[in-house]
Amino acid sequence: MNMVRNHVLISIDANTIIAGARAVEDALIKEIARQGLSQEIVVLETGSVGIEDQGVVLVVYPEGIYYTNITPAEVPELVEEHLLKGRVVHRLMLKETPKRFVITKEKTGLMKEQPRIVLKNCGFINPESIDEAIAADGYQAAAKALSSMKPDEIIAEVKHAGLTGRGGAAFPTGLKWEFASKVDNPVKYIVCNADEGEPGTFKDRLILEGDPHKLIESMIIGGYATGATKGFVYIRGEYELSIERLEKAIADARSYGLLGTNIFDSGFDFDITVMKGAGAYVCGEETALIESIEGKRGHPRNKPPYPITAGLWGKPTIVNNVETLSNIPEIILKGAENFKKYGTEKCSGTKVYTILGHVATPGLIETEMGTTLRDIIFEYGGGIKDGKRFKCALVGGAAGAFLGPDMLDVKMDFVNLREYAAALGSGAILVMDEDTDIVDMLKSVLHFFKHESCGHCVPCRLGTARLVELIDRIAASKGTSKDVEGLTRISETMKDTSFCPLGQSLILPVSSSLKYFKDEILARVQ
Amino acid sequence: MTKEKKLSITIDNRTVEVRPHLTILEAARTHNIYIPSLCAMEHLPSYGACRLCVVEVDGLRGFPTSCTTPVEDGMVIRTDTGEIRTLRQEVLKLLLSEHPASCLFCTEQDECKDYQGTIRKAGVITGCRYCPNDTRCELQQVTERIGLTETSYPVYYRNFPVEKNDPFYDRDYNLCILCGRCVRVCNSVRLNGTLSFKQRGKITTVGPAFDRTHLEAGCEFCGACVTVCPTGALSTKTSKWYGKPDKEVATTCVYCPVGCTLKLQVRKSEVLDVLPDYNSALDHGFICVKGRFAVPEYVHSSFRIPVPQRITPLGYNDISWDEAIAEAAERLAGVKPDSFLMMVSPQLTNEDLFVAQQFARQIIGSDQIGSPLLYDLGADTGPFVNLVSQSSAFDVIDDAEAVLAIGFDSTYDYAPIGIGTKKAAQRGAVLVTINSCDTNLDMLSEMAFTCGTEKWSALVGLLTGASAQGAAPLFPTWKKDIAGIQGIFKKSTRKVIIAGPGLLAAPQRTEIIEKLLKVKEKGGWDIIVAHPYSNLKGMLAMGAFHGIKTGAIINENGQAEGVKGDLSKFDLTKGCTVIYAVGVSDLDSLPDCDYLIYQNALPSESQRRPDLLLPAALFTESSGTVINGEGRILPVNKAVEPYRSAKPDWWILNAIGERIKKGVMKYAQVQSVQKEIAKTIKGFPGVKKRLEFSRIDVKMKTPKGAPKMRKQGQFNYRGIPLEAVVKGMKAIEERIELISGSNRGAI
């Protein structure tokens, strides 16, 4: 047997692939072979390690050294210096390892343990290997649930854990499952919403790319608890790698008997189909998503009936977000009480955020509910880039609110933010520094909404069109103060009368930008 | 089962009782409480697009739309608060920001109405009145009710080209407000699925997918989308600029034996347009292209025969009715009974047919009454007439478990039967089709057997179990399918066969018909016959048929024994002295004669020139009744005065008859004919009732000079192909030709 001295993890996700990860990987393997180290050094593919915007990222274990912005040209030096001679290449190393890179299992120096529930295995296992997933506790929760728990016990546990929907609406997941389990229908479906369309959000993609088995496991448990025997994962069509990895994971799980008939000898049958979205933001709305799976145009449906009573093909349907579902195995395995240790009183657990914009280290993090915006930006995000001042952050994607400096110390969770007329939404945090032009920012948000409005209802279809005309005029310094009033008037009408959340939530960016930056906007029209 | 309890709700401080399962909007409408709405419509699924019907409901967040929110017991609803009014105005302003609104907000509006009454004076450039829907527009009405008098947005003109390349209706999507009514009616009501939304957001439009034309996309041209359109976006080509009708006359369509209710839109002496009646229990408003679009152009055709005309060596001379009647009477008086031939169309009313047979039998003393049916079917007339007499009510489809459609396609006709079948298939009934080309039912069928007409008889025998003799080897590839279907049919109890017009084009049609009659008797199948001879049942009931006495076939007491007819001595090739053709236009097939009277609305397309032309009134111009395919007596109501000096058929026959032999007929008005029918046929019921028919057993032998199969795939009325006078029907005929070759069915 070979003695492996070092493991080199290379992050293969959609971002790093663009940055040339495959070429680096090839070069690495060739170089290791050339230097005769093939017996001692293993190169492993993994999902995102959480560092974005830094090119190809390598992690060398057991030292836990992160190399960023690696190109094939640097590979020979790296192999020779670090892997052969054991000298860290400081030039290429990520200087300061932020907290977020610490995985639950490791304690490094002074840094305290961080809660990683959803991202536990991301950037740690090879997402394309079911064995690694199983080695990292994969499918243990499913085994426990199916062999030793009754469906209502699972639901009670999830309810007790206080898990809420992470897609934005924060509906209690346990309650949703309970409703679904009580609907009397032999055919039910469980759908995972992976149509992550909120600008600035890429958490679901990295979860799927990093640990697809966790989702499969969660859906098995969800199906067992609610009585659904068929699962669908609706993924954005652009998420090619997610789709590829999830499909491989599903095929592997099938071959291991983890999907199919009589799973864990429990008599429970379950299988999952992957459906690709075609690039419509509105299909993230659960009823539009259902229409899309049915092969119809992505228009939201009338509610009631809610999907829980009549969803996919008229059958009871549970729709959960990727991140929501990915919390389930931990709850089942370690119990609700353990889950409730994290987070706030009203919102337990953790939240995965994507930090981007003018921060020093953009990326993916998971922290407890209730972490302040200040902590997220300044500790995890490494502060504002180039030493500039914080202006505001757009929290929750395009359908979120601009939060100014006064909100930096507010505890962020779904319940608390609602009191400040803001929303945690998808967990995207777009940070802007003092030089950002708020009118341009608002303009791009409104253009996005106009482009993504499905056209079903009048206020959204024509409201977004008129808002874009107003903001374009204001941005071109041709507007009047009446145009600024128009922004408020239209978005308020849209809030009260739009068919679905797409049109209703546009008020958030408009009213919050006017709250903080009315003077700046008015300065453009005078 | 307990009766569903009524719910008590409070709307605007009024407590009212309503049925459960209604939406707030429906509940309000039943109590005459106005809530503005543009997208909601009776018979269509809720959609919630226009957002004008927002209300406040205690306990519900925000402003729910009344068209999508179901009522609940104890609900407290406010429909007209200040906040709601503002919201409605704001939404309407947005809606009108992309809808030409000069008819709503122009300062010259009143002046314009007084002095510029016609669209033709003002063009698109001035921005006024280029919408054909002025004064009929729901958007105008809603704007007035909401009280919007100005808008804060400049009107954005989307500049879509007006689409005029399909027959029957034009589409100007610049006027479209995307209420989705047309899409819903096409998909959910007509189950056709031609229309859908294209693109998304602000550039959404309506139309068939992949930019095909409507014709290519399988549009039925039923016009349901035009009917439900609240704006001028969809408009009937022939009547778009005609404005509001004065009155509406409900009548029965005589183009096929379904007998749909047509709501004729009448102004002065003109039928402008025809609308369906969604509350009709018979057809549910599912009229087809013929009823919807092919009436006005036919009845107001410029080719109509205006006055009686007599042939001269130099052409036709106009003569007065007096002269015409005198001449006809003179020619007919003393004619030998067996050298007279009365040809009647099965598309006449019962009254016309009754008077026609009376004319032949009592005035001339002849039983020589024929119809084009005999030329189409020849020796197969007997079995066919027997099949028709035993056909069931159309609503047997509604709870059928299995439906077998033979030679049937409902794209352009028999729409209520077709939609009934589609609905049955959607709720789980097993549908099997047999045809020689693709049909519009195939998509919903369990199995579509597409094969040449020569194999149909064997296939029908196999599937229904009528006879399997020597048939199986004909279908080696369908062995499994046939066995499967046989099993399903054997298990089902409520089974329906739809015998479509394609059946008449099959060479072994008698054999098939005999099989159908056998399985009806022994196998428990119901049979619906979709054929082109609209009032055939009326013709048989009235006895306007050689060898069948008036009223003989009406099975008053449910007697099982049949009526015997004998056509074997009826020679259609023998020369005559006088032939009187009523509503029959294929004159070249008729035998030789000395004198030919042609009584019809439009001139014949035949080579042969009749001696006397008598202008007949059409079904929009005279009253009467018809008996539809299920034996129901339906009213035909006069909507306009006859064209020029045209007269109803019964009137002309009566006048000539009176001249020849006084005192036999003496009908002053159609009611006196109806009285006579009631007197002659005991137990002839009133309108809307259903008649039971006896079996008919007509002895036949192939008439001399065996009739050739007539041109297939034509829609006729009174012998005139609709395409000859209705422009759009030409495109329809071409489309049928393209899809099916010539296998669509007779007439």
Image (cartoon, rainbow, N blue to C red):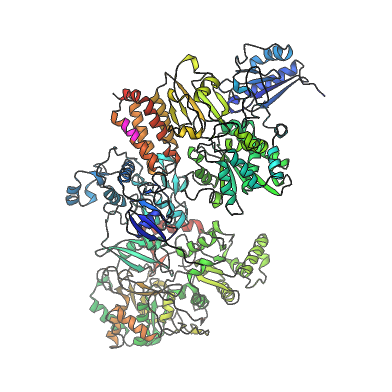
> Residue A117 placed where, x, y %?
62, 31
Q: Is residue A157 left or right of residue B311?
A: right
Residue found at the very far right of the displayed protein: A1
Does the stretch in magenta take in B18?
A: no
Asked which quadrant contains residue B430, the reply is: bottom right
Q: Is residue B661 left or right of residue A352?
A: left
Classify B470 as above or below B427. Answer: below
Q: Nearer the viewer, residue B7 or B542?
A: B7
Instruction: Name the quadrant of the C terminus of chain B.
Output: bottom left
> Residue B104 placed where, x, y %?
25, 46
Asked which quadrant contains residue B486, the reply is: bottom right
Q: Residue at x 27, y 57 (%)?
A: B244
Asked which quadrant contains residue A231, the reply is: top right
> Residue A300 placed where, x, y %?
47, 45
> Residue B169 placed where, x, y %?
36, 53
Q: Nearer the viewer, residue B609 or B646?
A: B646
Q: Main secondary structure of the magenta part?
A: helix
Q: Residue at x 50, y 41 (%)?
A: A285
Picture mark count: 0
Q: Nearer the viewer, residue B590 or B348?
A: B348
- The range drawn in magenta is A484-488
